[in-house]
Amino acid sequence: MSAICELLLMNLIVADQRRGRTPILARNSDYLLSPVRPERCILLPNMPSKMKRPVGVTILALVFLWIGFGGAVFFPFIAGFDVFATPWDDFAGKVIHSEAWLRITLYLLETLWYLAYIAYAIMGLGLWKLRSWARTAVYVINLIGAAASILVAAIFVRPGILALAVLAGTVPPFLWMAWYSQRPRVRFAFGAWPTSRDGATVTEQPPGLSKVGKAWLASALVATLVLYCGALLFAIEGELKSFDIYKMSLKGAEDSPCVAAELGSPLTPGWMVTGGTEESSESGSANLNIPVRGPKGKGSLEMLAEKRDGVWKITSLVLTDESGEMQILPADPHSGCH
């Protein structure tokens, strides 16, 4: 019976190949079986084992399911509190001046956003069940995501170093998922890998990356991570240094004769500014630690400031170096630093 079934299946395979079709095969311990036809061969004992899902596909499926189902459950609650209303009014209000149209476009955007979560959940189920359309959808969506990230970073993100951080953090993951979906082993698992080579039937799993390929892949991942972290740090640093209160702190230190006597002049700011600011048009607060260096030594400026009625005022500016702490602002009349 097995010999007859195998002969019949091989004839079907040859006929499919002549028509340009790719038959889907599964290996039995004795002969090849088709999961689609003929039915009489499928009903024989020793059914073929289920196709093994690659680990990467499992991870992608879980990620898509998490995003899809999580978003579908929680997004309506978030949207119900009008969380997106104010940002959308600020962004689109410059172009759309009608309140009614602002609400309509916001509801349309939220509906599309919700449908995207549903699509993610469906694709996650498709990946979990090794559906070929799901693999194709992931490939296309990630290419679109990479292109969209480039456009958004180039048009909307400033300064340039922050745009570089956005690109490093979004484009490589999109391209990696698109590349992975086209890997031979992934295509084989989804039934999209050629089943014949040089006239011979191929049922073995394609080989994975070589040691050299794995080394290049690991190097690329590490380089991308370093680029992302470096660009992000530079972007945060540049953002802090662009604040008026940062410049006021440096000027206060440069104008102090005690700082000049301690560190020398001119005073050069260093990297790795820490702290943060909270600011609106009328009020705000700041807490910064600024590394500084002069011809005679180095130290750090510890600054506290408040913004009232749109005007910044430094409440405390202290220089810390090897000799200890020195109060710069408010000036101590007994220190001579004023």
Image (cartoon, rainbow, N blue to C red):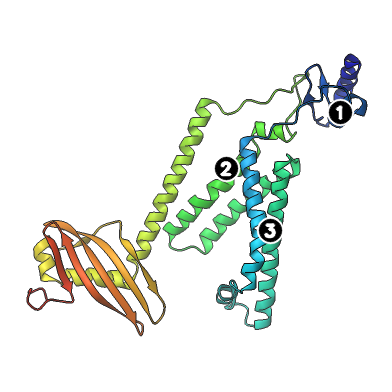
Q: Which residue is mark 2?
A: 176
Q: Residues within 10 Å of mark 1 (few under 14, many from 20)?
A: few
Position of 268 with respect to 9 (left or right) is left
Position of 115 with respect to 32 (left or right) is left
Q: Which residue is mark 1?
A: 16
Residue 251 on image: x %, y %: 22, 71
Seen from the viewer's position, the closer of residues 56 and 136 is 56
Q: Amino acid at mark 3?
A: Ala
Q: CA distance from mark 3 to mark 2?
A: 21 Å
Classify 97 as above or below 45: below
Residue at the location (88% across, 23% down)?
A: 44
Residue 223 visible to an observer of this rendering: yes
Marks 1 and 2, the one that precedes in the sequence: 1
Residue lying farthest to the bottom in this orientation: 309
Q: Are marks 1 and 3 in contact (CB under 8 Å)?
A: no
Residue 53 picture quarter: top right
Marks 3 and 2, the one that precedes in the sequence: 3
Marks 1 and 3, the one that precedes in the sequence: 1
Q: CA distance from mark 1 to mark 2?
A: 33 Å
Q: Residues within 10 Å of mark 2 (few under 14, many from 20)?
A: some
Q: Callout 2: helix, strand or loop?
A: helix
Q: Amino acid at mark 1?
A: Asp
Q: Amino acid at mark 2?
A: Trp
Residue 116: which numbered mark, if any? Answer: 3
Residue at the location (48% across, 40% down)?
A: 221
Residue 39: which numbered mark, if any? Answer: none
Seen from the viewer's position, the closer of residues 282 and 266 is 282
Residue 295 visible to an observer of this rendering: no
Tag count: 3
Q: Residues within 10 Å of mark 3 (few under 14, many from 20)?
A: some
